[in-house]
Amino acid sequence: MELNTAGRTDGMSKVTLIGETLAEVGTEFVYGGESAACEGCPYREQCLNLTAGRRYRVTGVRDSGTLECAVHASGVTAVDVEPAPVVANVASNAAYAGSKAMLEGPCPYSECPSYEFCEPAGAGFDREHQIAEVIGDPPHEHCMLNRDLTLVEFVPESDE
C-alpha cells in the first residue's frame, strides 16, 4: 500500500494509520505515541506522524485495505484525521471565548460527573489553552474541591 507521507489533504487534515476497529468517521482518540511494538515496522512513517497527547477526530476512512500491526490485533488502515477540540472545566473567572486558560489541576474524585472535564484527555495541566466557546455550567452540582468552574471548548491544537 502506498500512502502520501506528507499526509495533507486540506488545511488541517492528515493521513495516518489507526486500528481497524477505530476507523470510523467521527471517532475521537488521543494519540499515545510510539509503542515498543512499533520497532522495525515498515509502516512507521505513515503511522507515527501525529503529536503524542493530542486529541484527533477521524474525518475520512481511506479504501486502502488492512495492514498487519503488532499493536492493533485487527490491523491498521488509512484514515484522514484532524485535531479535535477538547471540552474542559476551567476557572469561571477565566472562561471567555478567545481568552486562554489553564486547567485547575488534578482531581481525586473520579466518580464526579465533571471528572472527565477536569482531567480531559488531550489537554495538559502544564500549558494554556485557547477557549473557542463557553458551554456553561459543568455537569456537577457541587465541586468537592470548592472550585468555581465553567465548561468550555478549547480550540483544537494545530500539528504545525
Image (cartoon, rainbow, N blue to C red):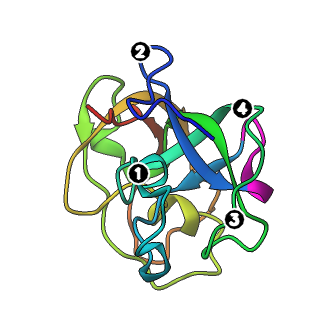
Question: N-terminal of the two: label 1 or label 2?
Answer: 2
Tag 3: amino acid: Glu
Residue visible at 36% across and 45% down? 92
Question: N-terminal of the two: label 3 or label 1?
Answer: 1
**Dot 1 lies on which element?**
loop
Image position, residue 1 (x, y; %) = 63, 41
Provide the residue designation for mark 4: 62
Identify the mark at residue 11; answer none if there is no mark.
2
3 vs 2, front mark: 3
**Dot 2 lies on which element?**
loop
Residue visible at 55% across and 69% down? 115
Q: Residues within 10 Å of mark 4 (few under 14, many from 20)?
A: few
Residue 154 is left or right of residue 117, and the answer is: left
Residue visible at 41% across and 51% down? 54
Give, as a single range, the part of the protein colored magenta. Answer: 20-26
Question: N-terminal of the two: label 3 or label 2?
Answer: 2
Q: CA distance from mark 4 to mark 1?
A: 22 Å
Q: CA distance from mark 3 to mark 2?
A: 30 Å
Q: CA distance from mark 3 to mark 4?
A: 16 Å
Question: N-terminal of the two: label 4 or label 2?
Answer: 2
Q: Residues within 10 Å of mark 1 (few under 14, many from 20)?
A: many
- In the image, residue 109 sits, relative to residue 7, either above or below, namely below
Who is closer to the viewer here, 28 or 69?
69
Residue visible at 40% across and 48% down? 50
Does 114 lie within the magenta span?
no
Question: N-terminal of the two: label 3 or label 4?
Answer: 4
